[in-house]
């Protein structure tokens, strides 16, 4: 899995020797049988690698739901966040409602912010958290990744639907003279229409994505999120929905009184892969 971008001397020292405990190896390859034997023999269910990634977080990242639930039932910390992200963030990135439900049932914090981004190999499909997602909460991430059922689960467990994300992204300066940082301010409703950056790694097809986006937008509106909130560059959710050509979302937003924003420069549709 992608690791945090900051330097870590323990990691540098340990990696030539494997850097993992037997339980971490079991979590890495979804070896539930070995994990059970190891825990029964006294292995620490909160084992983590030199970066601080726990066995539970690793299982969530890899989509190993049974192993995740086993570790939680044996007392693993659902909020382990040493590397800057939790198992809940990972489960949401995978669009795995069952894992999200298990984590919340065992006390995962539904408002835990993402603390760091994770690097990836160039031109790869490695799951990772983009820099502009740092600071986002689970509910906002679920909206951004078109996961209305997970959004409902999170709200049921106390997530704040009115959270406003301030994402920092690096853009080319005007005239091509270097780069500059730009903060994009987005609500969960705006995130549901693709605003706020960060790619959805488990991507439904276009028709399903439009239906999920509509459901996520409706839910956010029902929970009190402002349909006319605008980002730093003046865009609104209605602008984003029009760029995506999601007619059902446009119709719903217009029915709720949504207005186009005052866009400061030409925009392109949010980049998504089918």
Image (spheres, helix red, strand yellow):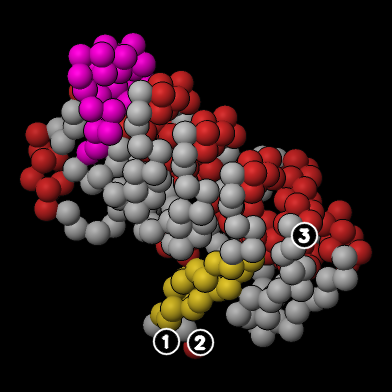
Q: Are marks 1 and 3 in contact (CB under 8 Å)?
A: no
How far is the residue under mark 1 from the one under mark 3?
A: 40 Å
Quadrant of the drawing holding the N terminus: top left
Label 3, on which residue?
221
Label 1, on which residue?
177
- Indicate the position of residue 177 as horizontal and vertical percent values: 42, 86
Dot 2 or dot 3: first in sequence order is: 2
Task: State the SS at label 2.
Answer: helix
Which mark is on residue 273?
A: none
Mark 2, Cα crowd under 10 Å, few <14 / some 14-19 / many 20+, is few
Q: Are marks 1 and 2 in contact (CB under 8 Å)?
A: yes
Residue 41 inside the magenta-drawn segment: yes
Q: How many marks?
A: 3
- Indicate the position of residue 33 as horizontal and vertical percent values: 33, 11
How far is the residue under mark 2 from the one under mark 3?
A: 35 Å
Mark 2 or 3: the one toward you:
3
Label 2, on which residue?
174
């Amino acid at each position: 899995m992608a690791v945090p971008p900051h330097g870590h001397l323990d990691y540098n020292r340990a990696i030539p020797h494997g850097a993992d405990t037997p339980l971490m190896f079991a979590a890495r390859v979804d070896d539930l049988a070995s994990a059970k034997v190891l825990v029964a023999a006294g292995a620490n269910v909160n084992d983590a690698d030199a970066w601080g990634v726990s066995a539970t977080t690793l299982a969530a990242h890899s989509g190993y739901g049974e192993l995740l639930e086993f570790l939680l039932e044996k007392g693993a910390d659902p909020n382990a966040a040493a590397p800057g992200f939790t198992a809940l963030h990972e489960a949401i990135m995978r669009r795995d409602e069952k894992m999200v439900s298990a984590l919340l049932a065992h006390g995962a914090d539904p408002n835990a912010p993402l603390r760091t981004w994770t690097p990836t190999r160039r031109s790869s499909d490695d799951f990772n958290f983009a820099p502009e997602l740092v600071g986002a909460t689970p509910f906002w991430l679920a909206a951004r990744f078109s996961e209305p059922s997970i959004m409902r689960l999170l709200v049921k467990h106390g997530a704040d639907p009115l959270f406003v994300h301030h994402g920092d992204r690096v853009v080319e300066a005007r005239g091509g003279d270097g780069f500059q940082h730009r903060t994009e301010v987005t609500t969960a409703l705006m995130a549901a229409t693709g605003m706020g950056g960060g790619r959805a790694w488990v991507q439904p097809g276009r028709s399903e994505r439009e239906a999920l986006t509509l459901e996520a937008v409706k839910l956010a509106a029902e929970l009190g999120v402002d349909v006319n909130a605008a980002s730093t560059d003046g865009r609104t959710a209605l602008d984003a929905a029009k760029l995506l050509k999601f007619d059902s979302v446009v119709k719903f937003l217009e029915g709720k009184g949504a207005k186009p924003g005052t866009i400061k420069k030409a925009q392109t549709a949010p980049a998504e892969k089918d």
